[in-house]
Every structure is written in structure tokens, then in C-alpha cells.
Image: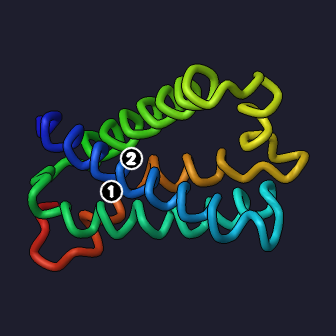
Amino acid sequence: MPWRRALTLWLLIILAESVHGTLRTVYLAPVIGDFRSRQLGVFTGTFIIYLVALTGSRWLGSRDAGTLLRIGALWVGMTVLFEVLLGRLVLGYDWPRVLADYDLAHGGLLGLGLVAMFFTPLLAARLVPDAPR
């Protein structure tokens, strides 16, 4: 199974998302507000994740739908861990602030982004011509 490559792609995703989050915080949040910018960031971030996955799909080389979904689950788990550790330990956010982005009932859309991330490896393998299936 292509776990080392899956982790490498996840690191690229997190790097791209970190740059994305920084730019969003600096340029967009002052204009439309922090929470709204985080909501919009779910959609632009999902697009970034798909670009990384599409670009790395052939290199990932998985042929099995089950493996691709396990890779998606790995990416989701690692991302949630990263987000919680970053929010709590680095940025000093309290639990309500960390969890607000996941609270769909109050406009938090990050859970939807994680669902999209789960399916991204499978969808990328299906969308890239000549990608292993």
C-alpha cells in the first residue's frame, strides 16, 4: 500500500492549507470577518486539496477503491489531529473556538470539507486520465 506517498501528499496538503489559512486570515478576514472567512476557506481549501490530490494521483499509484478510501480516512484523521493541536497548543484557542468550525448547526463547515477530503483520493484516481484504477 502507498502509505508513505499518501503521507507525503498529506504533508503537501497541510503546507498548502497553512499558507491558504495565513493568507485568508491576513487578507480576507479583515474584510468579511473571521468566521465568514473560515466558512469560505472550507470551499477554497477543498479546491486546494483536490488540486494536490489530482496532481499526485498517478504518483500515489493506488488501484483499489478500499485503499483510496483508507487513505482519505488517514488524511481526515491526521488533519483533525493537526487542527486540534495547532488550535489548542500553538494558537491557544479554547475548545469552543476549536470546535466552532465543525458545528454545522451554527455555520461551521469544516466537517463538510473533511467529508470531501475523505473521498478526494478516490475521486482524483477516477478523474486523472491513465491513473491506476
3 over 59 or under it: above or below: above
Q: Amino acid at mark 2?
A: Ile
Q: Residue at x 19, y 61 (%)?
A: 56
Disc nearest the viewer among 2 and 1: 2
Q: Which residue is mark 1?
A: 122
Residue at the bottom extreme of this rendering: 129
Q: Nearer the viewer, residue 121 or 44?
A: 44
85 over 2 or under it: above or below: above
Q: Residue at x 30, y 63 (%)?
A: 52
Classify mark 1: residues with Cα within 10 Å, few (<14), some (14-19) or many (20+).
many
Q: Residue at x 35, y 50 (%)?
A: 15
Residue at the right extreme of this rendering: 106
Q: Which residue is mark 2?
A: 14
Where on the picture, by quarter, is residue 53?
Answer: bottom left
- Place of residue 129 in the rendered image (x, y in percent of width and height, measured from the top left): 16, 79
Quadrant for the C terminus, please: bottom left
57 over 63 or under it: above or below: below
Quadrant for the N terminus, please: top left
- Place of residue 99 in the rendered image (x, y in percent of width and height, measured from the top left): 75, 32
